[in-house]
Image (cartoon, grey):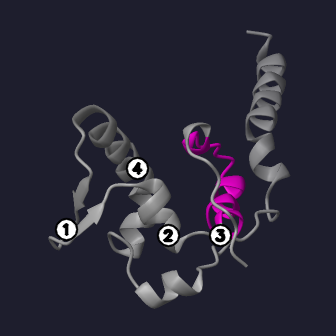
Amino acid sequence: MNDKGKIIVGLIIFVAVFTFPFWYNHGSATQPPEPKLTDKAKKAEKCVEDTTYMRTEHMQILDEWRDTVTREDKRVYVNKSGKEYMASLSNTCMDCHSNKEDFCDKCHTYTSVDPYCWDCHTYPEEKK
């Protein structure tokens, strides 16, 4: 086994290449953006579900709404506490979050997510 040196050099190169993204970006991470709420959203204080749930599950809720509205014609969403809402991105969500640029786009840009909501829906008119 006279290849001991080559194996060690190969392992060092492998580890360096494999870990490059981690040490190259070390310390350069930015803080996640804080979406701006409209006055109406601040006044409402609560979305269709609690804030933590909405931050992590809003995409599942919107997918579920899309499927139930378009396939089953069910337009009512009942939240965990039993309150009913109209299952509508344009009317229910965008009624409070009409500032798409400051609310939706900030986080989607930060996470490099390109949702296809606006392929079918029209952009809400920004209210400033």
Quarter placement of the N terminus: top right
Residue that label 1 marks? 80
- SS assignment at label 1: loop
Residue that label 2 marks? 95
Instruction: Measure the C-alpha gap from mark 1 to mark 3.
Output: 26 Å
Question: Earlier along the polypeptide chain: callout 4 or callout 3?
Answer: 4
Instruction: Measure the C-alpha gap from mark 1 to mark 4.
Output: 16 Å
Question: Earlier along the polypeptide chain: callout 2 or callout 4?
Answer: 4
Query: What's drawn in magenta, residue-wise?
Result: 100-118
* Percent x, y of residue 39: 57, 87
Q: 54 or 17, which lies in front?
A: 54
- SS assignment at label 2: helix
* Percent x, y of residue 107: 64, 61
* Residue 38 position (above or below residue 100): below
Please name the amino acid that badge 3 sits on. Asn
Looking at the image, is mark 4 or mark 3 nearer the viewer?
Answer: 3
Label 2 with label 4: CB-CB less than 8 Å: no
Question: Earlier along the polypeptide chain: callout 1 or callout 3?
Answer: 1
Label 1 with label 3: CB-CB less than 8 Å: no
* Residue 90 position (above or below residue 70): below
Please name the amino acid that badge 4 sits on. Leu
Question: Earlier along the polypeptide chain: callout 1 or callout 4?
Answer: 4
Label disc, if present, on residue 62 of the rendered structure? 4
- SS assignment at label 3: loop
* Percent x, y of residue 115: 59, 43
Q: State the residue at coordinates (14%, 70%).
A: 82
Please name the amino acid that badge 1 sits on. Lys
Residue that label 3 marks? 99
